[in-house]
Image (cartoon, helix red, strand yellow):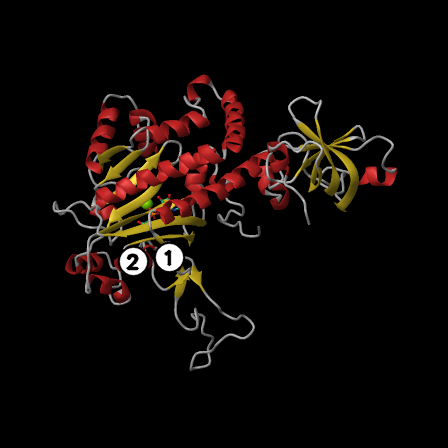
Amino acid sequence: NDRIRIKEVLGSDMVNHNITIMGWVRTFRNNQFIALNDGSTNNNLQVVAELGHYNEELLKRITTGAALKVKGTIIPSLGKGQKFELKAEIIEVIGDSDAEKFPLQPKKHSLEFLREIAHLRFRTNTFGSVFRIRHSLAYAIHKFFNDKGFIYLHTPIITASDAEGAGETFHVTNFDLENPSKNEDGTINYKEDFFGRPTNLTVSGQLEAELGALALSDVYTFGPTFRAENSNTARHLAEFWMIEPEMAFSDLEDDMNLAEEFIKYIIKYALDNNREDLDFLASRLLDEEKQKPQNERNEMGLIEKLEFVINNNFERITYTEAIEILKESNHNKKKKFQFLIDKWGVDLQSEHERYLVEKHFKKPVILTNYPKEIKAFYMRQNDDGKTVAAMDILAPGIGEIVGGSQREERLEKLEERMKEMNIPVKELSWYLDTRKFGTCPHAGFGLGFERLVQFVTGMTNIRDVIPFPRFPKNADF
Ligand code: 4AD
Ligand code: MG
């Protein structure tokens, strides 16, 4: 199989080369011009089938969606907008496509509609661009950490613990309906789980990553995580991928620095390596913006936004300062929030986050030192007795993209907090052991991969940046 990808054909000068390409028909005009695409780029290669050269039977089978193999010679193109085309010598239909039943039309389809046709969704320009960028970001993530000497640690998907202690776990069971196991008294044992042990799907690889960091110094995870929160929003999935670095001998400041450097690196990587796809999505977004009333339009285009983020420092403020800003804005009647922030200690709603990021600072914001009551048990307690060394990064248009903290490395403090929060101390003895044998300050964060892909691609709905989205009641494809 000596086929060449269309991206390569269009990106180099192969005039007079005899080559083979394979792809799917986008359009077929005048019984002569085939626009062929193989998913390597949104640009189609124009294949010219000389008139009178091919029999009627074959020509009839060249329909939108059909898979073709074409052997021919690259020639300079006279057509507008393309430099090269392929003068076909042999055309072979590899897979037919019933033109009458083919669900995609040459017009624009809604993203919701495309979500219903899993296999053809990938054949559209929008999703082609999104998934090529998603791939590229995943690659850049490994490159970033590898270049810094971090070890990629694979953490388990089936686990007995709830790392966040938030009770949002999916239960795992191997219950056999036809042949259920029985209790001693003969009744059915409905509680049979993972070979007799209750388990769930992981919500985060952090606790395991901490074990890795306290031996290997710097580690990261990058894998699927699961949340059983019944939220139908444009930024929640039941199954999403998370990147979780964990660093020994590091504090909150180191953690923020790493997260900011990391996000900027990934965005720059996309700008440097995915420009064609980003430009396509940027112009798609611009069309969308034009439908909106003037005052609701974004001030910046996609590329401008990404360049702005990599060229400016993130704003760093404490939770307490954020509350002051929100109270003040309410006071000045600049913005009336539906959920009024009237007292210190409450969690921020997404409308507050959006105000801080999109209206007040107009740039990504790192919020630190949250009240301990609204954060997880493992975060390091500050000396004020009220706050923990937490940090969340809020991004324009997305909201929370990163959640992280310095960890409580002091055994007594950690145990005390776990008891206060009803976290099972005994079950987590494997975790607490790290605090007994050479504990040290350490810190890490979790970045939701899909939210990052959303930010980079400008896609509005998180369901459109993962190949097979999982959200309430959606699990077939
Ligand atoms: O803030 P979270 O819950 O933090 C943790 O899980 C920590 N253990 C991370 C750590 O310190 N190692 O989740 C981290 C990030 C969020 O900021 C968000 O980007 C993403 O994961 N996230 C989700 N993304 C999509 N759908 C959901 N339901 C998400 N829940 C969290
Ligand atoms: Mg969080």
Report which quarter residue 430 is drawn in.
Answer: bottom left
Label 2 near label 1: C-beta < 8 Å?
yes
Give me the C-alpha separation between circle 1 and circle 2: 10 Å
What residue is pinned by disc 1? 153
For residue 460, say whether it is visible: no
331, 466: nearer the viewer: 466
What residue is pinned by disc 2? 216
48, 303: nearer the viewer: 48
Against 268, residue 415 (above or below) is: below
Which amino acid type corresponds to the residue marked 2 in the rendered image?
Leu
Q: Position of residue 253 (x, y in %)?
A: 22, 42
Element type at mark 1: loop
Q: Residues within 10 Å of mark 1 (few under 14, many from 20)?
A: many
Q: Position of residue 51 (x, y in %)?
A: 84, 30
* Disc 2 residue lies near ligand 1 with CB under 8 A: no
Which amino acid type corresponds to the residue marked 1 in the rendered image?
Leu
Drawn side of residue 14 relative to residue 330, left or right? right
